[in-house]
Image (cartoon, rainbow, N blue to C red):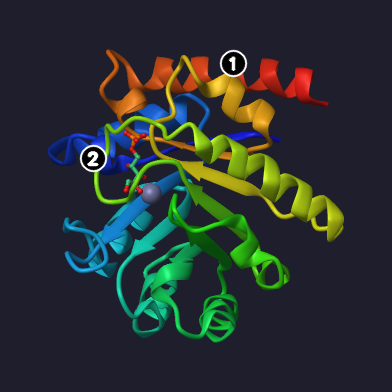
Amino acid sequence: MVEIIPSILSADFARLAEEIAAVERGGASMLHLDVMDGHFVPNLTMGPPVVESIRRATRLRLDVHLMIENPERYVEAFVGAGADAVSIHYEACRHLETTLDKIRKAGALAGVVLNPSTPVAALEDAIVMADYVLLMSVNPGFGGQKLIPYALEKVRKLDTLRKEKHLALPIEIDGGVNRENLAEVVRAGCDWIVTGSAVFHSPSAEVAVREFREIAAGATAVRC
Ligand code: DX5
Ligand code: ZN
């Protein structure tokens, strides 16, 4: 089933609990939390204490996207703070398998993220180590950017690769997904769809999530 996963990066942090409750009412079952360190990406966001507070405020599954250098140092702290899924960038990992194992041993799903310019072929062997793969459809660091069209071609390639390997792992996409391109994103083969500004900068985050879920369900029916 296709999941719409709101990214709180574009939420109003002063009203975060309300914003989270709204997307939950809209039918979201997962929340995307963007962790940035000012090194891997030119922006700063949150650390484990914020994840822990969010964990206490909601029952939604927490999908933590680490845009940080040396992720192996921090993955256990994020799982300990309540993450259900933790993804690490291929570009930031010297020992990908070891770090993915650390996440899994700590008790969360372990995901690999590829930047737009990293080819899907980089995962040809490593794909078996991951519980899910996140393809960036913008250069990471900021919400509200435009989806890079060739990202959808990468989704199709990754879909082919997972079928060849007989893997059922979800493909996640992150960046620039909106009402206009959502159906195409689903048809390309995405299962977990992150969306930030299109949900939280709309008049009602609850209504936006509900509508996005309907669009995604319609496009999934076409895909199958
Ligand atoms: C960008 C983040 C995204 C961001 C997406 O680096 O990883 O999760 O919140 O925001 P939109 O949907 O506005 O592109
Ligand atoms: Zn993200």
The answer to whether residue 102 of the structure is visible from this angle is yes
Q: Which residue is mark 2?
A: 16
Q: For the residue labelled by badge 2, is the local secondary structure a helix, a strand or a loop?
A: helix
Name which quarter of the figure residue 129 lies in. Answer: bottom right
Quadrant assignment for the N terminus: top right
Instruction: From this view, report whether residue 183 is shown above or below residue 163.
Output: above
What's under tag 1, amino acid-wise? Ile
Say which residue appears at 76% left-offset and 54% top-offset: 161
Q: Position of residue 159 (x, y in %)?
A: 73, 45
Say which residue appears at 32% left-offset and 16% top-offset: 204
Relative to 39, 148 lies left or right: right
Q: Position of residue 52 (x, y in %)?
A: 31, 63
Q: Position of residue 107 (x, y in %)?
A: 57, 74
What's under tag 2, amino acid-wise? Leu
Instruction: From this view, report whether residue 179 is shown above or below residue 68.
Output: above
Relative to 143, 65 lies left or right: right
Q: Nearer the viewer, mark 2 or mark 1?
A: 1
Q: For the residue labelled by badge 1, is the local secondary structure a helix, a strand or a loop?
A: helix
Disc ID at residue 215: 1
Relative to 197, 166 lies left or right: right
